[in-house]
Image (cartoon, rainbow, N blue to C red):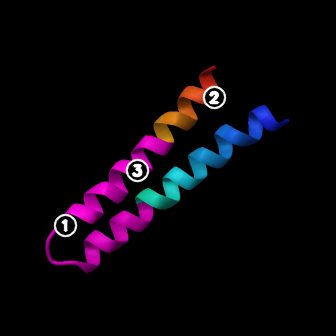
Amino acid sequence: MLDDLLPSTLFVIGILVSVAAELRLRRADTGSFSNGCITAAGAGLVFVACAAAIR
């Protein structure tokens, strides 16, 4: 059960981080370095979740 829960949790967290970065970008006039890092972190979490699910 833990094997199924970990990738799902990582995937949901990655999506939430990406959505949070998108909301921050919409509020700001220009993109900043921190928003780029947040977006990259969200994408990385989704990638790790997919890799863990395939494994």
Of the two numbered discs 2 and 3 in the rendering, the one whose residue sits closer to the viewer? 3
- Within the image, what quadrant is residue 29 found in? bottom left
Residue 41: mark in rendering: 3
Q: CA distance from mark 1 to mark 3?
A: 14 Å
Q: Eyeballing the image, is 17 above or below 8?
A: below
- Residue 47 position in % (x across, y down): 47, 35
Q: Which residue is mark 1?
A: 32
Tell me the amino acid under the disc marked 3.
Answer: Ala
Q: Does the magenta stretch mainly form a helix, a strand or a loop?
A: helix
Tell me the amino acid under the disc marked 2.
Answer: Ala
Q: Earlier in the sequence, mark 2 or mark 1?
A: 1
Q: CA distance from mark 2 to mark 3?
A: 18 Å
Circle 3: is it few (<14), some (14-19), or many (20+) Cα within 10 Å? some
- In the image, 24 versus 33, the foreground residue is 33
Q: Residue at x 66, y 48 (%)?
A: 9
Q: CA distance from mark 2 to mark 1?
A: 32 Å
Are the residues flagged by discs 2 and 1 in contact, CB closer than 8 Å? no
- Residue 38 position in % (x across, y down): 36, 58
Q: Earlier in the sequence, mark 2 or mark 3?
A: 3
Residue 6: mark in rendering: none
Q: Quadrant of the N terminus?
A: top right
- Within the image, what quadrant is residue 21 found in? bottom left
Q: Which residues are magenta?
A: 19-45
Q: Which residue sits furthest left? A: 30
Q: Residue at x 65, y 38 (%)?
A: 7
Q: Which residue is mark 2?
A: 53
- Within the image, what quadrant is residue 49 found in? top right
Q: Quadrant of the C terminus?
A: top right
